[in-house]
Amino acid sequence: MTDAPANEIENLSPEAAKALFLTLEARLAAADLAYHQKDDPVLSDADYDSAKRKYRALADHFPELANSASLLDAVGAPVSSGFEKVQHAVRMLSLGNAFEDQDVADFERSIRKYLGLSADAPLAFTAEPKIDGLSLSLRYENGDLVQAATRGDGSTGENVTANARTIADVPQHIVGAPDVLEVRGEVYMSHTDFAALNERQIERGGKTFANPRNAAAGSLRQLDAEITRSRPLNFFAYSWGDLTEPLAKTQFEAIERLSVLGFTTNPLTQKFATVSEMIAHYRSIEAQRATLGYDIDGVVYKVNDLSLQDRLGFRATTPRWAIAHKFPAELAWTRLEAIDIQVGRTGALSPVARLTPVTVGGVVVSNATLHNEDYIQGRDSKGAAIRDGKEIFPGDWVQIYRAGDVIPKVADVDLSKRPAEATGFSFPITCPECGSPAVREEGDAVRRCSGGVICPAQAVEKLKHFVSRAAFDIDGMGAKQIEQFYNDGWIKQPADIFDIQQNYGSGLQQLKNREGWGEKSANKLFVAITDKKTIPLGRLIFALGIRNVGEVAAKDLALHYQSWTALAQALDTALPAAQAHRAADEAVSEERIHAAQANRRARITETRNSVVAQMAVPDAAQIAWDDLTSIDGIGPTVGLSLSDALSNTAERAAINRLTAVLTIVAPDAPAAESPVSGKTVVFTGTLEKMTRAEAKARAEGLGAKVSGSVSKKTDILVAGPGAGSKEKKAQELGIQILAEDGWLELIEGL
Ligand code: IVH
């Protein structure tokens, strides 16, 4: 609601509010009439939405106005986006990407490996176009459409039922379906409809859309479903969520079943038995791309057998059984006007290309990434030539490419168009924000500001990250507010956020007296901050903004350690092992480059072992380090970043100050009722019924922790044939030992 900030409205006098309210009411009524009855809008969608939001906000703040309002719809109070939130019964996920044919072959191989299938065992896939629209989940109960929701963040979407009912491809009733069935698919707009809509919008002075996907999204997410009705949207069904009985045994038959039930499914969906057939279908779809009449951005492959899909399951946000094979990126040429350096949260100096704006695949691009200094000079991180070694100069004519939603990149340079006066770019060796040396460590492609918390750019970026949606998600505290509070010295580190009410809620300097704030908005912020004093452990870890620790790693760490104290203690204990690991890394980097191929591996292991031995790492440190780095998805890189952050005195003091004021909530084990939830399980020896990866994912899915080594903390050792020292150690420690069948019996039916 950028156009109607709450404080702007709440500061109005009742008289001024009433005058504004009546003006808006008249304007909206005229617009409604023009749009619906004369089919000739007088307001653009954006202006209409903005006026309506202001109108609603006024009614919220001045209840006496709401009583006389004639244009407030019966629907419950709108949430911030204007739509009611919907919790998805089954999460709506995204897809992993493949760009090269080799990635598709790797995908197939990894599935075989995971399932323990030999190279010649049959394994079929479906292949279908990846529609470039927005996903929608349609819930049917006893054959009636009861709810339609957008994907949102995957767990919570927006309730767009009224809007979805206006789409011709969305059946209102279906016959012969399971009692509960959620059909998922893509809402999109055809090229012809898109062009016609934009033409209509131009004629009427409304806003035009950059591409069919934006047009589809903008049209579906209208607060007024009548606007959606006037926009020609389509829907392809390609998957499902919650259901009371399976649709079929295979993906292909399930799609056929959806088609029989009355959904439109994509006619290019086919079944294949080999990777080469899948890739041939990809090429054929790519060749038809321009004439399909709607935007697609790749081909999706899915394992056909649904029982195998079940076994393969999901990673954090993507299924193991499907992948999107993307089409090559879209390209355009433009002028590189300048190169700016941005300093990120972890101190990385990132060169940003400022471009003469250019349209790439329907989107106007004026900034693009240049990655790092080597990239500008035409080298990769190992010193090998890229772009045939061509350097990029400010002023050059450059090629920009974009693949899907990825940040645009500068791909190539045309030397024949280089202006005579152009000179090379000298990458700064001091931080442009704080002047500290910008250091490039061996093996790191990136130059980083060494200022740490004294660098204002790093500190501000860290704070912005801290309050962001996937971290503390503090309502009313966004990038803009962080910048203001930081510049005024109100907030220097995360813990200051939780002192803001105490320091600026009363007394000489008060938040409510600042420009842009009022009593209500200030109090609202204080409440939002207090609310977040209780925080899930995973969010806290992610919020700290430690290099290499993303959302998924943070969740994995939370699940493993269950408390901040346990994680911090483990890192303190592991410190000597982390230091030895780094020293060994440094020592082996020479070998990696110079040792002859034949004995490189042996040389590396030997050097590594000798460095670690010299450093005399205590056993407890080694165990803590091994435990940390054996968590699925957490390797030495994440381990070292965590260790660096927690052993840095200033950073640790800031973290300690923060954690002291928080109530940190341990994550729920995924299945509390499972007999193995919360238990630590170790697998050893050969498993015969499933691969190690599948066994591990299955156990973790049931809430168990899987560790690589046996210790006093181990609860169950699953030992297959050939188990050796781990089994012996488990016997000595009196740990429960199960054969593979015993383990499967224990978790059967879960
Ligand atoms: S399957 C669990 N099939 O692509 C996987 N998705 O990048 C469910 N999409 O969120 C998705 N065409 O919005 C699937 N034929 C197709 C698709 C498709 C487009 C979208 C969908 C998804 C996104 C992931």
Image (cartoon, rainbow, N blue to C red):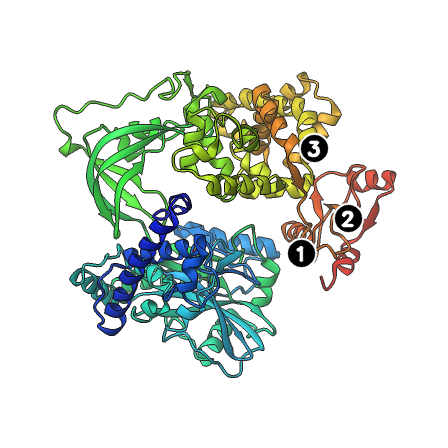
Q: On the picture, is 243 further left or further right than 453? A: right
* Residue 279, position as x, y percentages in the image: 39, 59
> Where's residue 417, x and y in %?
14, 34
Q: Quadrant of ligand 1?
A: bottom left
Residue of label 3? 565
Q: Can residue 211 be seen from the camera position used here?
A: yes
Q: Is residue 387 above or below residue 124?
A: above
Q: Amino acid at mark 2?
A: Ala
Residue that label 2 marks: 719
N-terminal of the pair, mark 3 or mark 2, is 3
Tell me if residue 575 comes above or below residue 266 in the rendering: above
Left or right of 584 on screen, residue 107: left
Give the residue at mark 1. 690
Q: Quadrant of residue 421?
A: top left
**Residue located 54% across and 42% down the image:** 528
Q: Position of residue 102 (x, y in %)?
A: 42, 50
Q: Residue at x 37, y 17 (%)?
A: 430
CA gap, disc 1 to disc 2?
13 Å
Disc 1 and disc 3: Cα gap in Å? 36 Å
Q: Amino acid at mark 1?
A: Met
Q: Secondary structure at mark 3?
A: helix
Q: Nearer the viewer, residue 679 or 416?
A: 679
In the picture, the quarter occupied by the C terminus is bottom right
Q: What residue is drawn where x is 74% and y is 47%?
A: 678
Label whose residue precedes the other's in the sequence (1 or 3): 3
Mark 3 CB in 8 Å range of ligand 1?
A: no
Camera-side mark, 1 or 3: 3
Q: Earlier in the sequence, mark 1 or mark 2?
A: 1
Looking at the rendering, which quadrant does residue 307 occupy?
bottom right
Give residue 345's position: percent from left, percent from top: 45, 30
- Whether the residues at callouts 1 and 3 have beta carbons within 8 Å, the answer is no
